[in-house]
Amino acid sequence: MSLDTRIASTVPAIAKQDGSLPSQQVPPSLCSWDVPFFSACDLSRCFQRIGKDFSIVQLTPGALVGRFTVVQLQGMSLLRLTTNKVLLLTGERGKDTTSFCLEVTGNSDDHRVQCQPFQQFSLYGFKQNLQEAHFQLSAGSTSILAITSCHRFNTFLTRVGQEHLLDQLMLSNCVQLDQKLHQSLSNHLCQIFQNPPSTAQKSRLAVQTILVSILSCLQSNTKQFVPFELSARDQLVQEMVSWGITHSNTPLTLDQVCQQLFTSRRTLILGSKENFGCGPMELLRIIRLQQVHHLLRSEQARQRAELHQVCEVAEYFGFRSRGHFARAYQQQFEESPRTTLLKSVA
């Protein structure tokens, strides 16, 4: 097995968000759980636990602290994600998957979905014909996601005589709500997190009430659907992130990266700064640091990759200068690489 193959099997590459939800009843031990996370790879494992894989990058420096809460219902998953740092999540969205998301604290300045910002009091993420998931969470935010199948939601709309809304769900990925309606949906979902249904019958009833609440938002006279338009530059930015994750052990110059992506320096720089507040080379460096962080936190992953020392891991991901690497790592994660390594074997 080549070194590249071993690395690929250990670094969480994100995702096949295959929206197919299990039809059988979820075991009680998995119906509701709540865990803290302290790294992007911790959060990736949380998503993997419910069958959703994402590549996750911590964009802002400092010690990451967050919380991940899940309530599994009959045909729907409710997720609540709190983070103190800006996070980027990307990967395949999956077939027959739709989600209805909202940020409930008001800290949504850095929120973006498919590279597009949105205003406060929005319901977003529901466009049904997207193949890729690409979203950014703000520092200090709490986001709630209701994930279900397109088929289930579309069948519900048809049964209640609201199939005309299907066109809007194909043309838009965000709807602007008034504060009262947004708060009502937020309160409804938060109540389910506080008191998860204890039986299959109550779970099915909870799903129905959630669907009705979402429908109320889509029908409201005060709502405003935002047309979805993915510009060529936004698409380029998503391709750059995916390329950076896949080729994190291939450090290149800016000109070489532009050649790989068939674009100009100016276009790539503008797109990166518009979306992430930094240039493309800085973003790719953060991605490589994230991959180093993952291996240093996992003794098992290092053994599979046959990379055992900090210098070996850093060099594999393109960091040639030990001093520059150590300073960059310390700045990004607020601890030295050696400290991370020692924690993994403690």
Image: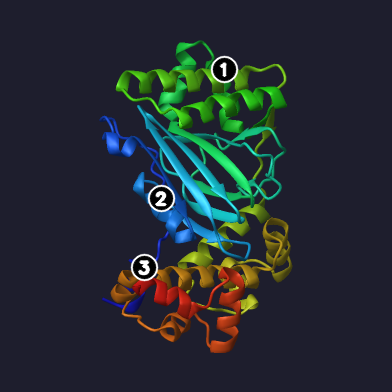
Residue 286 in the image, given as x and y percentages of width and height: 58, 69
**The residue under label 3 is which amino acid type?**
Ala
The foreground one among 214 and 15 is: 214
3 or 1: tag closer to the N-terminus = 3
Residue at 45 percent of width and 41 percent of height: 69
The foreground one among 78 and 9 is: 78
- Residue identified by numbered label 2: 46
**The residue under label 2 is which amino acid type?**
Cys
Quarter that holds the N terminus? bottom left
Quarter that holds the C terminus? bottom left
- Residue identified by numbered label 3: 8
Helix, strand or loop under label 1:
helix
Q: Are marks 3 and 2 in contact (CB under 8 Å)?
A: no
What is the C-alpha distance between the residues marked 1 and 2? 36 Å
Helix, strand or loop under label 3:
helix
Query: Which scheme is used to colour this image of the protein?
Result: rainbow
Q: Is residue 259 left or right of residue 300?
A: right
1 or 2: tag closer to the N-terminus = 2
